[in-house]
Image: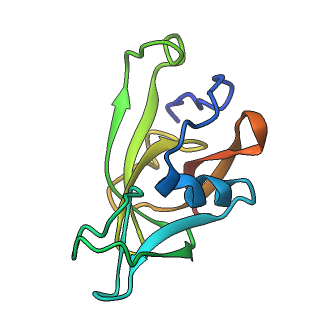
Amino acid sequence: MTTINDTLDIPREAPKFRSFSKPFWDGTREKKLLLQFDPAVGKFQFYPRATSIYTGRRNLEWREASGCGAVHSFTIARRGRPPFQGKEPFFIAVVTLDEGVNVMGNMVDCSMEDMKIGLRVKPYWHALPDGYHILIFTPER
């Protein structure tokens, strides 16, 4: 089995959020993935924005999502910049969540043989300073 490095021991900074993304980051304190939902069209959006990408309105709701989904695309980073330099190779994946939005993040606890398009994944909440967490993905098993 070919090994790929996990990036969990890399120090990461706490987020610098904007007023409209604060609920997203506050949710991570409890390891909850909160996504914006536009009730006018019945769709989620990600990343957090001040207005709906569908209607341009500010009538967005925050709803909890599972964080589960399938790998849509991925790459193997064989060269990294600080703070990832020296931790290569590692995965960066675009995951289509079950709620229909794409989220990019690192993939941990996954071998090169197991990684593939369509791989089912679940969230792994990595602790950050000040009690926040960052969403990383790991295979469902």
On the image, the x and y values in percent for residue 117 come to 32, 56
Residue at image location 57% in from the left, 72% down from the top? 66
On the image, the x and y values in percent for residue 96 come to 36, 64
Q: Identify the image quadrant of the C terminus.
A: bottom right
Q: From the viewer's perspective, is 74 left or right of 69?
A: left
Q: Nearer the viewer, residue 51 or 32?
A: 51
Q: As displayed, is residue 63 above or below residue 95?
A: below
Q: As displayed, is residue 138 above or below residue 80?
A: below
Q: As displayed, is residue 99 above or below residue 31?
A: below
Q: From the viewer's perspective, is 46 left or right of 90?
A: left
Q: Nearer the viewer, residue 33 or 71?
A: 33
Image label count: 0
Q: As displayed, is residue 134 above or below residue 121?
A: above
Residue at image location 42% in from the left, 60% down from the top? 119
Residue at image location 23% in from the left, 70% down from the top? 56
The quadrant where residue 65 appears: bottom right
On the image, the x and y values in percent for residue 12 come to 62, 27
On the image, the x and y values in percent for residue 115 come to 42, 48
Query: Please, which colouring scheme is shown?
Result: rainbow
Residue furthest to the left in view is 55
